Image (cartoon, helix red, strand yellow):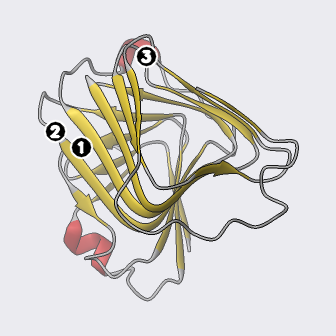
Amino acid sequence: ITLSGGRVGFGGGSEGLVFDQRALAQLANAERLRLRSYTSMDFHGDIDFGRAGLGNVTLDAATLAGYGNASVVLRAQGLTLENSVAAVADAAALPVGTGTLAIRADELVLGTGDKSVQGFGQLELAATRRILGEGSGSLDAGAADIRLATPLLTARAAATQALRTTGLLALAGGQGAATEADPADGQGARLTL
């Protein structure tokens, strides 16, 4: 299932598509869910896609935006972050915050397109199996500190991905068992941290 809107809000918001845990649970029969925003994904609280019965979720937007100074935990079994339509968010309308965006998944895919994180002081990317770069793209956290925790950081063949911050960047081995790498993965790939 693919659902698209000018904006997508989680746990609050009044524009575009707005989801809470109950609304996500109504989509539980979907094998794959793609939520596309033509600007930003706005986080007002924690979201657990797994608890809602969703296994593989793609968040397709220019920006992951945090509102308020609270921390937000985003959980999923399989989660892809991408910007497939080259969406652009209005920087002047984006929030400034100090909370933490903690993304926790079994497998986290950094997909196609340029993406940014706004309204958070820290970004935590944690995957129990792997963090995988796919296609050509980037994730820019601005001044937010970034912490990566995973047993395997890799990329698909010919992928070009960049993870940017003007803050601190920490890389740690995560809890869990790494996915067995495909021999073709990594060939000609470039991950820039």
Q: CA distance from mark 3 to mark 1?
A: 23 Å
- Expressed as whole percent of the image width and height from the top left, the position of residue 58 reads 53, 59
Residue matched to label 1: 13
Point out the residue furthest to the bottom here.
Answer: 29
Q: Residue at x 28, y 21 (%)?
A: 95
- Of the 4 image quadrants, the one containing the N terminus is bottom right
57 with respect to 13 (left or right): right
Q: Is residue 133 visible?
A: no
Residue closest to the eye, 121 or 61: 121
Between 119 and 13, the residue placed more toward the observer is: 119
Question: Looking at the picture, does residue 58 appear above or below residue 84?
Answer: below
- Using a 10 Å C-alpha cutoff, classify the residue at mark 3 as few (fewer than 14 neighbours), some (14 to 19) or many (20 or more): some
CA distance separating discs 1 and 2: 16 Å
Tell me how far mark 3 sits from mark 2, CA to CA: 17 Å
Is the C terminus in the top left, top right, bottom left or bottom right quadrant?
Answer: top right
- Mark 3: amino acid: Gly
The residue lying at 62 percent from left, 34 percent from top is: 87
Q: Is residue 71 above or below residue 51?
A: above
Earlier sequence position, callout 1 versus callout 2? 1
| SS under mark 3 | loop
Position in image of residue 57 (x %, y %): 49, 66
Residue type (three-letter) at the residue carrying disc 2? Ser
- Mark in the foreground, 1 or 2: 2
Kindly report which numbered mark, 3 or 1, lies closer to the viewer in this rendering: 3
Residue 2 visible in rendering: yes
Precedes in sequence: disc 3 or disc 1: 1
**Number of other residues with Cα within 10 Å of mark 1, as a class: few under 14, some 14 to 19, many 20 or more:** some
Tag 3 residue: 142
Label of residue 71 in the image:
2
